[in-house]
Every structure is written in C-alpha cells, then in structure tokens.
Amino acid sequence: MSKDERDVAVKTISVLEGKFERLVKLLDIVKNYFVAKSRRLSQKDAQGKPTGKLIQPLFATMNEPSLAQVGSLMMLTCGHNGKPDDLETSNLTIHLDHAGFISI
C-alpha cells in the first residue's frame, strides 16, 4: 500500500469514526427517551395493579425538554404519504447535512 493510499484510508477511517460516534450519541438519546417512557408506562399502585394512567407525556410542558431530547420540527405540506416539494426536500437535505447524517 502506498503512502497516499494509506493516508486516504486513515482519513476515511477517521471520518467514519466521527460518524459512528455521532450515531452512538443519537441512539443514546433515543434509548434514554424510551427508557424514561417505559418507566412512566409501567407505573403501578401500591397493590401492584396498573394505575390506569398508562399514557402520560414524558415532559410536563414543552418548555421542559431540551432540543437534544425532542429534536426539531420541519414544516411539510405533503403529509405522511405524500412527496415533499422541492423547497421541503432542500430544507430537509440542509438539515441532515448540518446534523452530520449526510454530506452535501
């Protein structure tokens, strides 16, 4: 392997390592959310019976969570099954680039 090929390989591994570290952090946020949610879903009374309050919001108000805990909203007019228009696609692409998921 030449020095140039080795340098490219080292750079590629470094980039991948950074992306994997970011992915681990994001998955940790998701895991923490679901762990906290499952604790709330599994509340029981003193006799061990479900309290009937099975669905409770994770946060009392939307002022409580941080942006890292809940993420951002993006305005889309296409709905769940539609195709976003060019502006929406562009906004999503820029958002994913800034989040480190893609590189444009």
Image (tube, rainbow, N blue to C red):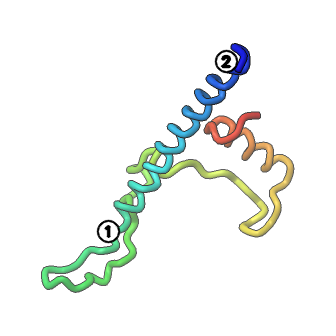
| Residue type indicated by callout 1 | Arg
SS class of the residue under badge 2? helix
Judging by the rendered image, the residue that carries numbered circle 1 is 40
Q: Residue furthest top?
A: 3
Which image quarter: residue 59?
bottom left
Residue 78 in the image, given as x and y percentages of width and height? 78, 63
Could you tell me how many numbered marks the image carries?
2
Which residue is nearer to you in this view: 37 or 76?
37
Q: Residues within 10 Å of mark 2 (few under 14, many from 20)?
A: few
Q: Residues within 10 Å of mark 1 (few under 14, many from 20)?
A: some
Which residue is nearer to you in this view: 91 or 102?
102
Which residue is nearer to you in this view: 64 or 17?
17
Which residue is nearer to you in this view: 59 or 29?
29
Residue 6 in the image, given as x and y percentages of width and height? 67, 20
SS class of the residue under badge 1? helix
Residue at position x 61%, y 30% in the image: 13
**42 lies left or right of 93:** left
Q: CA distance from mark 2 to mark 1?
A: 50 Å
In this picture, is 89 found above or below 5? below
Residue 91 in the image, given as x and y percentages of width and height? 75, 43
Which image quarter: residue 55?
bottom left
Q: Nearer the viewer, mark 2 or mark 1?
A: 2
**35 lies left or right of 20:** left
Residue at position x 26%, y 83% in the image: 50
Tell me the tag on residue 7.
2
Q: Residue furthest right?
A: 86
Residue 102 in the image, given as x and y percentages of width and height? 70, 39
Residue at position x 39%, y 54% in the image: 32
In this picture, is 43 found above or below 96? below
**1 lies left or right of 99:** right
Residue at position x 74%, y 66% in the image: 79
